[in-house]
Image (tube, rainbow, N blue to C red):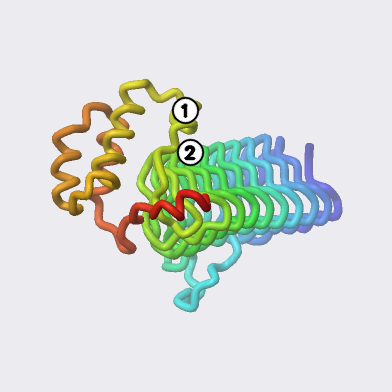
Amino acid sequence: MGIHPTAVVDPTAAIDPSAMIGPYVVVEGPVQIGPMCRISASAVILGNTIIEEGCQIHSHAVVGDVPQDNAYNGGVSYCHIGKRSTIREGATVHRGTAEGSTTVVGDDCLLMTNSHVGHNCRIGDGVVLVSGAVLGGYVDVGSRATISGNVGVHQFVRIGELAMVSGLAKIVQDVPPFLMAGRDGAIVGVNRIGLIRAQFTSAERKDVKNAYRILYRSGHCRETALRQLAKDVTTDAGLRLLEFMLQDSSRGVARFARREEHLET
């Protein structure tokens, strides 16, 4: 452990003695790096960034740089990486745009190679961004969601807990919790395998499946479907899906996929 002699570390940075800072790493500004973190060769950590304990930042990743947003006026904003998260080679995480705002990556996340988390995103615990996945600004991603390779997610979109997004997808509307989105962003079904692996009970899985049927297969309009869903949900998982659907949405919620879109996914 320790700081490699070729690393460039700002004197205002606070680095735990148990952290390892590799060769040619750049730490610029009042960065805080917690215990047992490993920052690999040529990574760059900038600004008011907090990296909590047990994180791994791989080579050529850039964390805490200024946002790619014309509204940014140079104010102090933040970036927060949760415990035990891994940021792989070439991935980027930008800090917030508005004064005092924060980009947040939760605990136990995996950001694979060349993925990008834009300004003011909020990513829950256990989220996976596969290589090349790109989140625009102000995207919210629920815990344990998976965003597959080379997915583009529009600004202000919400992706719910344990949702699964297909590779190469274009996501311009919200993806509800526990469901799967195909390449055009339309909903194609329930993330059944994900629910089983996450140890959801059979009652919870049944509730989610019924919610999907009401929302996407019943033919009801949104208002009727939500009234029916509010009557039918019986588990915490179902209630969380209902809560997501009742919240305000900047982009609207993804529609149901046509049959030919199912076949392509």
Look at the image and tell me in which quarter the N terminus lies: top right
The residue at the far top in this view is 202
Is residue 248 depicted above or below 81 in this figure? below
Q: Residues within 10 Å of mark 2 (few under 14, many from 20)?
A: many
Q: Which residue is mark 2?
A: 144
User: In the image, 46: left or right of 196?
Assistant: right
The residue sitting at 20% across, 53% down in the picture is: 222
Q: Amino acid at mark 1?
A: Ala
Residue 99 position within the rendered picture, expressed as x and y whole percent measured from the top left: 42, 67
User: In the image, 96: left or right of 31?
Assistant: left
Q: Which residue is mark 1?
A: 198
Q: Amino acid at mark 2?
A: Arg
Examine the rendering and report whether any part of residue 11 can be seen.
no
Is residue 45 depicted above or below 76 in this figure? above
Residue 88 position within the rendered picture, expressed as x and y whole percent measured from the top left: 69, 48
Examine the rendering and report whether any part of residue 172 can be seen.
yes
Occupied quadrant, residue 44: bottom right
Q: Secondary structure at mark 1?
A: loop
Residue 138 position within the rendered picture, expressed as x and y whole percent measured from the top left: 42, 61
The residue sitting at 33% across, 34% down in the picture is: 209
User: In the image, 6: left or right of 250?
Assistant: right
The residue sitting at 64% across, 43% down in the picture is: 86
The residue sitting at 49% across, 61% down in the picture is: 170
User: Which of the pair 54/137 is nearer the observer?
Assistant: 137
Q: Secondary structure at mark 2?
A: loop
Is residue 102 depicted above or below 69 in this figure? above
Residues under numbered marks 2 and 1 in contact, where contact means CB atoms less than 8 Å apart:
yes
Occupied quadrant, residue 210: top left
